Image: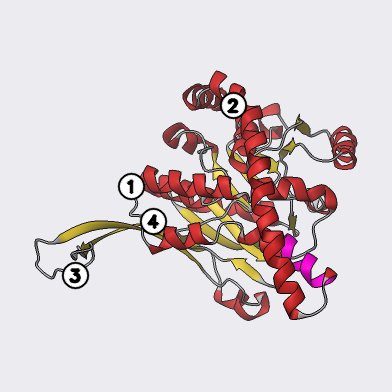
């Protein structure tokens, strides 16, 4: 076998999603089921010391490339770091809390080769027990342009029905198929097919597409990154496929470890989510409709669900005590969250000023073209 044949077609880029405590289970599942050759780049953004040491030892044992930053990273920032080091035909983006199954990678590559797909998504499951409940079996995304009647009154809101009193509304569409259903109930209904949506929990992408669409958008700090990528790919004529022969699960619903909480609070911070939504809206010229207004109202819901609710449930007896404690903890959480994101932003301001997005994109695309 010559050196060209021995060079893997696939680079797997593993990045932090929202916690570090699933690192070992996720990484070891990748090597347990390595039925297809790959290069692996692990981007470790500020993991606690025991995870840092584990990854350092594992990188030596398995001979993968470990890129460590002492600070936390937003997911697209971490993916771009790995993407800069990638020169293979395909790149797999996978989060550090995803557990894979036999032939997961081989099936993704075969689908991409057979169909010419730009992106291929596995059948993504959620939670434990592993591989039993569907999270994403493809879906839809895009922008719908609609005519909407102008509403005006003496106070600014009285409906007008005249044809000339219409305005253009640009509405985002995001729909996930089969979420929450049992794999055993839907597996027979699923086959390799074109779809409109893939998620960053796990996807394989033709690396050459980044020559057309540019770097992953780092202004999307914590939400809708996958929607943005899929819309960009579709806009330039790329295709997205679902390959249900490939099955993976992202581990969710398990309690956070104490060493996860700081990163989790930053990752799902109000500031990051609001900034991401506002950037998405401006980038795609979307109307600030109920979709966005509801998102703004629910800022912090993941922290409430994962940190505050379990804490009040475990520490306080009775519904009234839990409700009162929950309100107090949410107020504290809002202030603490604002403090954490401000400290993080100030620490990174000088770095980001010294390396603009345009410079960053140029350096990434230069690396990809090597």
Task: Find the distance from the CA under tag 1 to the CA under tag 3.
Answer: 24 Å
Image quadrant for the C terminus? Answer: top right
**Image marks 4 and 3: residues in contact by CB distance under 8 Å:** no
Q: Nearer the viewer, residue 37 or 290?
A: 290
Task: Find the distance from the CA under tag 4 to the CA under tag 2.
Answer: 32 Å
- The 10 Å Cα crowd at callout 1, few under 14, some 14 to 19, many 20 or more, is some
Q: Nearer the viewer, residue 25 or 39?
A: 25
Vertical placement of 289 versus 68: above or below? below
Marked residue nearer the N-terminal end (2 or 3): 3
Marked residue nearer the N-terminal end (1 or 3): 3
- The rendered magenta stretch, by its main secondary structure, is classed as helix
Q: Does the segment drawn in magenta span residue 308? A: yes
Marked residue nearer the N-terminal end (4 or 1): 4
On residue 159, the disc is: 3
Q: Report helix, strand or loop for mark 1.
A: loop
- Which residue is identified by label 2? 349
Task: Find the distance from the CA under tag 2 to the CA under tag 3.
Answer: 46 Å
Q: Name the residue located 47 percent from the left edge and 24 percent from the top edge.
A: 358
On residue 142, the disc is: 4
- Which residue is identified by label 1? 285
Q: Name the residue located 75 percent from the left edge and 50 percent from the top edge.
A: 19
Q: Name the residue located 72 percent from the left edge and 57 percent from the top edge.
A: 103
Say whether residue 130 is visible.
no
Instruction: Report x, y in % for residue 348.
Output: 63, 28
The span shown in magenta is: 307-314
Q: Nearer the viewer, residue 314 or 129?
A: 314
Instruction: Report x, y in % for residue 303.
Output: 68, 58
Instruction: Report x, y in % for residue 253.
Output: 74, 65
Q: Report helix, strand or loop for mark 3.
A: loop
**Dividing the picture into quarters, in which one does residue 329 lie?**
bottom right
């Amino acid at each position: 076998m010559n050196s060209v044949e021995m060079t893997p077609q696939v680079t797997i880029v593993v990045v932090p999603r929202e916690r570090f405590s699933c690192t070992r289970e996720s990484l070891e599942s990748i090597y347990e089921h390595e039925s297809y050759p790959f290069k692996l780049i692990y981007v470790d953004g500020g993991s606690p010391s025991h995870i840092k040491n584990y990854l350092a030892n594992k990188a030596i044992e398995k001979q993968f490339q470990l890129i460590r930053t002492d600070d936390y990273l937003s997911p697209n920032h971490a993916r771009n770091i790995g993407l800069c080091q990638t020169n293979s035909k395909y790149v797999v983006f996978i989060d550090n809390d995803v557990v894979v199954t036999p032939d997961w990678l081989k099936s993704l590559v075969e689908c991409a080769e057979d169909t010419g797909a730009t992106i291929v998504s596995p059948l993504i499951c959620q939670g434990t027990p592993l591989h039993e409940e569907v999270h994403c079996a493809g879906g839809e995304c895009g922008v719908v342009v609609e005519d909407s009647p102008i509403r005006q009154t003496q106070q600014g809101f009285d409906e007008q029905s005249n044809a000339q009193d219409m305005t253009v509304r640009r509405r985002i569409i995001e729909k996930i198929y089969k979420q929450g259903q049992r794999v055993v109930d839907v597996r027979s209904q699923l086959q390799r097919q074109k779809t409109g949506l893939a998620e960053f929990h796990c996807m394989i992408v033709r690396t050459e597409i980044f020559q057309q669409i540019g770097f992953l958008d780092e202004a999307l700090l914590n939400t809708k990154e996958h929607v943005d990528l899929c819309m960009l790919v579709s806009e330039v004529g790329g295709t997205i496929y679902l390959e249900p022969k490939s099955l993976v699960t992202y581990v969710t619903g398990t309690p956070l470890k104490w060493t996860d909480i700081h990163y989790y609070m930053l990752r799902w911070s109000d500031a990051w989510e609001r900034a991401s939504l506002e950037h998405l809206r401006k980038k795609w010229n979307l109307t600030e409709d109920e979709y966005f207004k509801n998102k703004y109202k629910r800022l912090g819901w993941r922290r409430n669900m994962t940190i505050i609710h379990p804490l009040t449930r475990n520490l306080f007896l009775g519904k009234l005590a839990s409700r009162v404690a929950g309100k107090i903890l949410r107020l504290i959480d809002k202030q603490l969250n604002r403090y954490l994101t401000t400290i993080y932003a100030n620490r990174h301001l000088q770095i980001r000023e010294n390396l603009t997005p345009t410079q960053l994109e140029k350096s990434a695309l230069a690396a990809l073209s090597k």
